[in-house]
Image: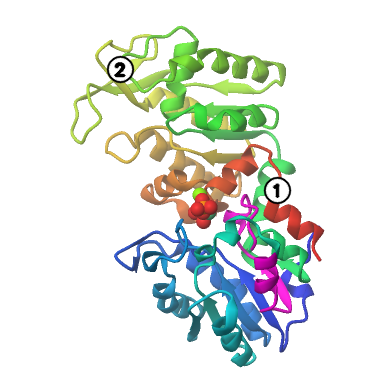
């Protein structure tokens, strides 16, 4: 177990916080501030309690120092989110950083430049980690979405300073724990997205954990194909048919019920205003491609979920980016959101596309928890240990 934020006595202390400020941005403007906004709780709590708060993060995947990946443009949005002026250091280690951190007064917050400007960050380099550690008395990791990376600011550092989980990290772990570790049963998972190949480990783990595994998106086509159905021009990983059958077998052994589409929306191309029709999965025309689950499938999914207490959702049911291929995703999302509001279903969703799909359906705020983590959420669904969490639990 790890310490929580309230267990640290932070007044007058320098607290190094690893946040995930790796936000979507275009031309120096933040296009989705969710990660900044959710990071604010921990920073404000620390500042209010008189800590000298030093925020670290990465932004993008720069190879060395690269002005295009500077985090300076985040100072204003972060200041807005925390309701006070955030100070800035041009480097995350070295003299400038030390001078700025040394000048902080109790309750002040500063942001350090991109930790990935130093290749030692991704190398989990111990010397670099010690340089970072020199800037703080405590270490707080609030970046669940980076916990799958064993980097200096997410792993090594946790061994060098007395450490704790931030409020966002704690919320994230609690929500995920409720969804899969100690869920109220029956529990269902919806796994969508385009490819089976990227989600093999995830499917393999989930069939041992959930009562119903609902498969949608392009990956469902591979399963339909593996069951001998014609999928026309659909996206389909034919070479994974054996693997798909193995997953179906494993599910049967684990008493996990797999739910595949029974009808689908097809079109001859993936584009706006394409002519669509709904067909049975046994009658997909040769010249058409599957782009969404059909209405009977959505109804069958909702029917299954009606008996469930917990739902974990990763990946849309169709090509939701383009209307009307968002219909099945929207129908199930709206139903699950209402059910959540009624207190009858715990809903936890995560992964980039999933969050966009739920936001597009207008239900993000109604879900019990929506994780802003992408890769970390997937690895957690795969049942893997996340180095950032392990290090935090071992602590210093
Ligand atoms: C993310 O957006 O997935 C996290 O910020 C981690 O970033 P990374 O995938 O570049 O390590
Ligand atoms: Mg990532």
Count of numbered labels shown in the rendering: 2
Q: Nearer the viewer, mark 2 or mark 1?
A: 2
Q: Which stretch appears magenta?
A: 127-152
Q: Is residue 309 visible?
A: yes
Work out which residue is located at the far top of the displayed protein and give it: 228
Above or below: residue 204 compared with residue 120? above
Residue 157 in the image, given as x and y percentages of width and height: 70, 65
Left/right of residue 302 with respect to residue 2 in the rendered view: left
Q: Is residue 341 visible?
A: no
Question: Which picture quadrant has residue 65?
Answer: bottom left
Q: Name the quadrant of the N terminus.
A: bottom right
Q: Residue at x 68, y 55 (%)?
A: 388
Q: Which residue is mark 2?
A: 233
Question: Which picture quadrant has residue 268?
Answer: top left
Residue 345 in the image, given as x and y percentages of width and height: 60, 44
Q: Earlier in the sequence, mark 2 or mark 1?
A: 1
Label 2: state its secondary structure.
loop
Which label belongs to residue 159? none
Left/right of residue 289 with respect to residue 173 in the rendered view: left
Q: Residue at x 54, y 40 (%)?
A: 313
Q: Which residue is mark 1?
A: 177
């Amino acid at each position: 177990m790890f310490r929580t934020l309230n267990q640290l006595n932070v007044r007058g202390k320098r607290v190094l916080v690893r946040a995930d400020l790796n936000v979507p941005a275009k031309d120096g403007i933040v296009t989705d501030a969710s990660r900044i906004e959710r990071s604010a709780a921990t920073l404000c709590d620390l500042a209010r309690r008189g800590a000298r708060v030093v925020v670290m993060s990465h932004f993008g995947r720069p190879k060395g120092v690269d002005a295009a990946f500077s985090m300076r443009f985040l100072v204003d949005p972060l200041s807005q989110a925390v309701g006070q002026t955030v100070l800035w250091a041009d480097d995350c280690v070295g003299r400038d950083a030390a001078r700025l951190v040394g000048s902080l007064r109790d309750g002040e917050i500063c942001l350090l430049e991109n930790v990935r400007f130093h290749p030692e960050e991704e190398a989990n380099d111990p010397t670099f980690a010690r340089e970072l550690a020199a800037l703080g008395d405590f270490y707080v990791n609030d970046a669940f979405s980076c916990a799958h990376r064993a980097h200096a600011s997410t792993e090594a550092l946790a061994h060098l300073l007395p450490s704790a989980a931030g409020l966002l990290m704690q919320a994230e772990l609690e929500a995920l724990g409720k969804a899969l570790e100690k869920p109220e049963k029956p529990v269902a998972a919806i796994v969508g997205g385009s490819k089976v190949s990227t989600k093999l480990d995830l499917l393999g783990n989930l069939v041992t954990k959930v009562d119903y595994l609902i498969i949608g998106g392009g990956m469902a086509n591979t399963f339909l194909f593996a069951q001998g159905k014609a999928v026309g021009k659909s996206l389909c990983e034919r070479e994974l048919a054996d693997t798909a059958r193995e997953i179906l077998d494993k599910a049967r052994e684990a008493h996990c019920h797999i739910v595949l589409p029974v009808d689908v929306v097809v079109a001859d191309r993936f584009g706006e205003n394409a002519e669509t029709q709904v067909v049975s999965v046994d009658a997909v025309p040769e010249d058409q491609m599957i782009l969404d689950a059909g209405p009977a499938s959505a109804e069958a999914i909702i029917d299954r979920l009606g008996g469930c207490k917990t739902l974990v959702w990763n990946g849309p049911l169709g090509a939701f980016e383009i209307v009307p291929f968002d219909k099945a995703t929207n129908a199930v999302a709206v139903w699950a959101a209402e059910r959540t509001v009624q207190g009858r279903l715990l809903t936890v969703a995560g992964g980039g596309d999933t969050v966009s799909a739920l936001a597009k359906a207008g239900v993000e705020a109604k879900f019990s928890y929506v994780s802003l983590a992408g890769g970390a959420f997937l690895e957690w669904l795969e049942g893997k240990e996340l180095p950032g969490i392990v290090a935090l639990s071992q602590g210093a």
